[in-house]
Image (tube, grey):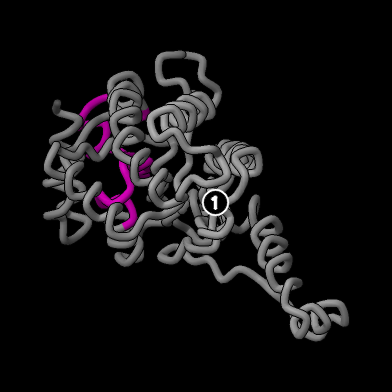
Amino acid sequence: MLYSSAKDWTDAPAKRVLLFGMSGLGKTHVSDLLRDTGDWFHYSVDYRIGTRYMGEHIADNAKAEAMKVPFLAQLLRTDSIYIASNITFENLAPLSSYLGKPGDSDKGGMPIEEYRRRQALHAEAEKSALLDTAHFIDRAKRLYGYDNFVCDSSGSFCEVVDPENPDDPILSALSQQLLPVWIEGTEAHTEELIRRFDRAPKPMCYAPDFLDQSWATYLAETGQPEETVDPDAFIRWTYARALAHRQPRYAAIAKNWGVTVAASDVSSISDASDFNTLMIRALEG
């Protein structure tokens, strides 16, 4: 690890961490808090995915929808208007909307093959965005004078790495530059995330094997043909399974490559000093 002890962390002139774990447990909250001190650079993997790697796909998808409206189609053909994604650190809706949901097109779904294609695009984009971290560490220091750096990873980080492989190219590269920090939730956190998701289901990113297995199982259990699947019903059904699937992968990353902090402790952080104290405790182990 980049910091193998609390002393290493305390003595380090530059502190660099990668926060990972389930979406909704505080990665972006802590990253924003650290950035607002003026001493930390905040690198959002999701933002990088949505701008550098998926921006054209997102915009083209929106244009394709606009072309279905004659009034807008004519304006687009004559370059009288333009359509662009307004993605931000806090608003990733353009990326989520592009990923979409599989199922009945009349209910906002798409064919499973198109869904798989978009999932594959996202996976490659996420790998590239993670590997861009070293470039942004250098850029943060060279351009802006930041020594401290926080990488705010996506919830699907664990789907694009092999935590049990000591030669995993992404984890190997990241661990040379940052300390991976797992924000671990409890069963209560998981239940709350499921309730929150059930109220407002959002597109998700899945490992290909997990998606194929989940899709096949859902079709078998419901007896529905692919084209009549309710998109929201499917992703609600899949969400809890996805959290259970990811939990051991997060744990393996923390065990083999980094450290673990409790989501309850993260939620009580109010400033950079609190975060520093939390990291010292985690490294003391």
Q: Is residue 121 left or right of residue 186?
A: right
- Residue 13 inside the magenta-drawn segment: yes
Find residue 125 and report its horizontal and vertical position in percent: 61, 42
User: Could you say where residue 70 lies in the image, as x and y percent from the top left?
Assistant: 78, 81
Secondary-structure class at tag 1 = loop
Horizontal relation, residue 51 to residue 26: left or right: right
Looking at this rendering, what residue extends furthest in the right direction? Answer: 78
Q: Residue at horizontal 18%, vertical 49%? A: 192
Residue 204 or residue 69, whichever sits in front: 69
Instruction: Tell me if residue 156 is in the magenta stretch.
Output: no
Q: Nearer the viewer, residue 262 or 134?
A: 262
Residue drawn at 20 percent across, 30 percent down: 283
Q: Is disc 1 surrounded by few (<14), some (14 to 19) or many (20+) residues within 10 Å?
A: some
Q: Amino acid at mark 1?
A: Asp
Provide residue 36's location: percent of width, then percent of height: 32, 67
Residue occupied by mark 1: 104
Image quadrant assignment for residue 238: top left
- Name the residue at 68% across, 68% down: 65
Image check: 264 left or right of 200?
A: left
From this viewpoint, is residue 175 visible? no
Q: What quarter of the picture does the N terminus occupy?
A: top left
Q: Position of residue 269 (x, y in %)?
A: 15, 55
Q: Is residue 230 above or below residue 173?
A: below
Q: Which residues are magenta?
A: 2-28
Give whichever of 195, 85 is nearer the camera: 195
Residue closer to the observer: 222 or 110: 222
At a point 47% along the width and 61% down the height, the residue shown is 92
5 sits to left or right of 141 = left
